[in-house]
Image (cartoon, rainbow, N blue to C red):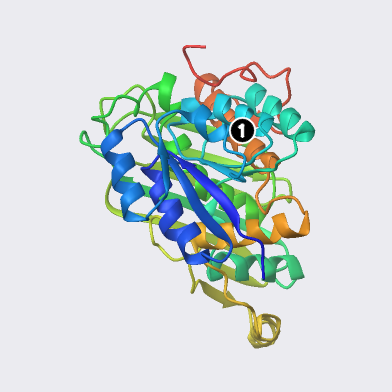
Amino acid sequence: MTRRFNVAVVGCNIGRSHIVEGYQPHGDKYRVLAVCDLDETRLSSVAEEFEVPRRCRDFDELLAMDDVDIIDISTPPATHRPMVLKALAAGKHVVCEKPLVGSLAEVDEIIAAEAKAKGRLMPIFQYRYGDGAMQARRIIESGLAGKPYVGTCETLWKRGPDYYDNPWRGRWATELGGVLMTHAIHIHDLMTFLMGPVERLFARTATRVNTIEVEDCVSSSWLMASGALVSATATLGSHEEISRLRLSFENVTFESTHAPYSPGDGPWRVIPANEAVSRQIEELLAGFPPVGRRFNGQMEAFHRALLAGDPPPVTSLDARRALELVTAFYHSAATGEDVALPLDAAHPKYLSWRPAA
């Protein structure tokens, strides 16, 4: 019989999605033992819906529960850093929603704390999970795809005044950024998951859709370490919501589904250069095991890693690369410069990408 880990979910909005998609389908692997939220109505609703035995409004109460193995942090972005640090210091494993923290300095602090901690940290990047994205990665890693040429990455969503009628959204101090931070960060992670690291980036940002502090439109050009070229666009003013990747390699072209919140789902369009490549891909994917979508797939992979004593399937270093990309976006947009990556402590936005800082 496999080990079952006890989970405490903090933040019952996005946290509810983690329960529905990630923990409930794996009831033999996880038990949601406690939920925590400042909103009493939301807290009670989620606790009752999923028959969670413990509920609290004080985060420190969870840390004192010896039988809680994993703290799942699904609270607003500006609250993540202290919660992650406290949970690691308490010896817990940690799952944390994006963005992990609010600067490269803070993510380096988290990485150092994790290195000394008993528990492991897994940031959430659920777009990697699903048959489409994972089959594409298998083909690319096998070498069958050949040389990468170009890629396009689109986050075309709709958010209006009702979405921003909220005390923390749309503000630099509490949301830490706009469409780059809370919407496009997942598909940008998926792009680098498939196309590798970014070497240089140029970006423009604008606030055109809503009356908010942060950006809601972005256009950018990336030079990948492989030499491939990528263009990435995001807006919160699209009247049809889609997320889409299209990747052109020497021997195959991939196009994701257009599902706005689950582009990793299959089937992707896989267009081989010729019949010989088509046969090789068919042989490679024969018997390919299904991959759970979104949180389902990520939580299943996390459980395997915990049992094996391996690093999580998504690591704090993955979160750093995502926040490094965000930092480069904001620096390029502010200065008009083409930004070289990776970024270290000498970078002018290492301590914060926010204008107020």
Is 195 drawn above or below residue 207 in the view shown?
below
Residue at 63% over, 28% down? 85
Quarter of the image for residue 179 reads: top left
295 or 345: nearer the viewer? 295
Residue 194, image x, y percentages? 64, 57
Q: Secondary structure at mark 1?
A: helix
284 or 153: nearer the viewer? 284
Residue 128, image x, y percentages? 57, 57
Residue at 54% over, 48% down? 7
Quarter of the image for residue 223 reads: top right
Residue 36, image x, y percentages? 42, 37
Three-letter residue code for mark 1: Ala
91 or 169: nearer the viewer? 91
Is 317 drawn above or below residue 86 in the view shown?
below
How crowded pointer 1 is (Cα within 10 Å; few <14, some 14-19, many 20+) is rated as many
261 or 241: nearer the viewer? 261
Q: Residue furthest left?
A: 162
Q: Which residue is mark 1?
A: 87
Q: Is residue 137 visible?
A: yes
